[in-house]
Image: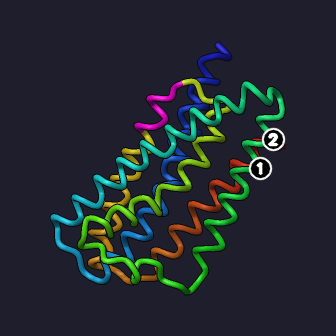
C-alpha cells in the first residue's frame, strides 16, 4: 500500500514541477504576446518549446541517473541543492527589469529556436535532480513537454490581451515552487 502512495506522490511532484517549469515559458509568452505575434508563430513557437521541454529534461534525467549511481545517498541533497539554486535564479530573474525577449526576433526560425532553448535550459537542471530518484522517465518528459507547450500557448495568447506585469509574477511563482521542492528534498 505504501508503494501506491509513493507512486502518486511522485506523479504529483512531477506535475507540480512541470507546471513550475512551464511558468518560464508562460511569462516569456506573455511578454512576446504583448508585442504582437501571429497565430502561426504562436503554434510554431509553442511546439518548439514543447520539444525542448522534452529534450532538455530527458538529457538531464540520464545525466542525473548516472550521477545518482555514482553518488548514492548524497543524491537527495544534491537534487535539493540544484532545485534551490534553480528556483532562486528564477525568482531573481523575474524581478530584473531587463527584457530578454526584445533582443530576439520571435518571427524568425533562429529567434524561435533561441527563445525555446532559453526557457527550456532550466528543465535540464531539474531533469538532473529528478534523474536521481524518478521511476518513469517517459511520464516525466511528456508531462514537462505538455506543460511547457500548453503554458507557452496560454502565455502567448494571453499576452495579446493583458498587461505585462503578469509575466513577472508567473516566473517568480515557478521559482518559488522549485525552491519549496528543493527544501523538501533537503529536509
Where is residue 92? Give x, y as percent. Answer: 66, 73
Residue drawn 31% across the image and 66% down it: 110
Residue drawn 40% across the image and 52% down it: 148
Numbered range of the magenta stretch: 136-142
Read off the residue under disc 1. 81
Proximity of marks 2 and 1: CB atoms separated by less than 8 Å: yes
Q: Which coloring applies here?
A: rainbow
Q: Nearer the viewer, residue 49 or 113?
A: 113
Residue 138 in magenta stretch: yes
Which residue in the rendered view is the most extreme toward the top? 1
Distance Cα–Cα, label 2 vs label 1? 6 Å
Query: Is 40 positioned to the left or the right of 125 in the image?
Result: left
Instruction: Choose top left, top right, bottom left or bottom right for residue 36.
Output: bottom left
Where is residue 77? Give x, y as percent. Answer: 81, 41
Residue 187 in magenta stretch: no
Majority secondary structure of magenta residues? helix
- The number of numbered badges drawn on the structure is 2
Give the position of the C terminus as an image quadrant: top right
Residue 32 to residue 57: above or below: below
Where is residue 17? Give x, y as percent. Answer: 55, 47
Secondary element under disc 1, as helix, strand or loop, is helix
Which residue in the rendered view is the most extreme toward the front? 110
Residue 154 to residue 184: above or below: below
Query: Is 25 positioned to the left or the right of 77 in the image?
Result: left
Query: Is 28 positioned to the left or the right of 150 in the image?
Result: right
Read off the residue under disc 2. 77
Amino acid at each position: 500500500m505504501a508503494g501506491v502512495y509513493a507512486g502518486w506522490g511522485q506523479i504529483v511532484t512531477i506535475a507540480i514541477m512541470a507546471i513550475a517549469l512551464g511558468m518560464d515559458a508562460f511569462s516569456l509568452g506573455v511578454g512576446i504576446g504583448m508585442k504582437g505575434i501571429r497565430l502561426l508563430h504562436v503554434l510554431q513557437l509553442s511546439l518548439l518549446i514543447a520539444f525542448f521541454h522534452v529534450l532538455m529534461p530527458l538529457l538531464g534525467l540520464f545525466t542525473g541517473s548516472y550521477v545518482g549511481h555514482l553518488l548514492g545517498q548524497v543524491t537527495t541533497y544534491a537534487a535539493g541543492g540544484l532545485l534551490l539554486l534553480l528556483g532562486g535564479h528564477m525568482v531573481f530573474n523575474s524581478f530584473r527589469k531587463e527584457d530578454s525577449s526584445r533582443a530576439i526576433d520571435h518571427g524568425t526560425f533562429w529567434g524561435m529556436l533561441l527563445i525555446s532553448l532559453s526557457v527550456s535550459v532550466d528543465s535540464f537542471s531539474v531533469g538532473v535532480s529528478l534523474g536521481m530518484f524518478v521511476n518513469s522517465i517517459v511520464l516525466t518528459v511528456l508531462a514537462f513537454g505538455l506543460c511547457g507547450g500548453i503554458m507557452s500557448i496560454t502565455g502567448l495568447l494571453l499576452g495579446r490581451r493583458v498587461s505585462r506585469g503578469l509575466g513577472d509574477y508567473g516566473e517568480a511563482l515557478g521559482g518559488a515552487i522549485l525552491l519549496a521542492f528543493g527544501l523538501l528534498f533537503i529536509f
